[in-house]
Image: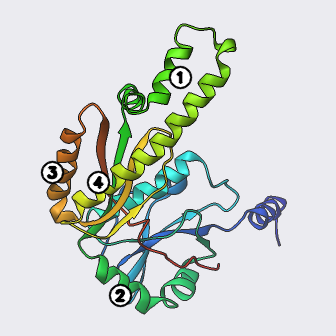
Amino acid sequence: MTSADDADDNDNDEGASAAVIYVYGIVPADVQPEDDATGVHDAPIEIVEHGDIAALVSEIDPDQRLGTPADLQAHAHILDGTSHVAPVLPLRFGAVVSDRDAVINELLAEHEDEFAAALNELEGFAQYMVKGRYVEETIVREIVDESPKATALLETIRDQPEELTRDARMALGEIIGQALEAKRDADTRTTLDALSPLTDTVTVREPTHDEDAVQLAVLFEVDRQGELERTVGDLAERWDNRVTMRILGPMAPYDFVVTPKPEG
């Protein structure tokens, strides 16, 4: 016989959604997450193994919304943290399957040889971002000094009301925009030339800001990170007060790996 309370419990169980498995990336089977490692929705990170490869996963509630900035940061944090100690094949944000068996059958077993080969090639490597941002005052002065037309337009609008110099301001803005694009191309080529003795595994990224000077993804050996830092540091000295240079990484090789998304 079932009591009224038991019936209510059964109804609640039937109404609750079963947890699903969120997949972050593929790693060698001997990788183990730290005991307190958490990912999306603060869920503990687990390993699902298949032969010599494994998936970094966590169990999440399918009814809880995915896609907040915190979720994206957690996804990247797990992958980038892993890249410090082992090769990792990142999956795109939002890869979810029904259960752990699906991780094995629909992802690991299906692509076992492909994943194992890719992990072997990535052993000891990680992605680094080489970024440069123009110093606004310096680069605008450089453009104006190089362009008699820009100089004349600047004199035209100097100390004049904006409503009386709208056309001149627009023309000046167009000149500066075109010049920035040309300088970005030239400075990117200079950076590529500087990096060429170290590696040719480089991807040029599109600018995300008007003042971006350089944005490159570099696949590089973690043990040689110091060489990359010195090369970029030399560029920073050369471009002192013109371009601010920085390196981000090591991180997962997002720009160099295409990992099939599970179908579950």
Residue corresponding to mark 1: 153
Give the x, y percent position of residue 190: 29, 54
Residue 217's image quarter? bottom left
Q: Earlier in the sequence, mark 4 or mark 1?
A: 1
Distance (Cα) linking label 2 and label 3: 31 Å
Element type where label 2 sits in the image: helix
Q: Which residue is located at x 59 percent, y 8 percent?
A: 160
Q: Which residue is mark 4?
A: 190
Left or right, residue 19 beside residue 35: right
Does label 1 or label 2 sit earlier along the sequence? 2
Dot 1 falls on a residue whose secondary structure is helix
Give the secondary structure at mark 4.
helix
Which residue occupies the foreground of this view, 251 or 189? 189
Q: Nearer the viewer, mark 3 or mark 1?
A: 1
Name the mark on residue 76. none
Residue annotated with mark 2: 117
The residue under the point 30% across, 59% down is 192
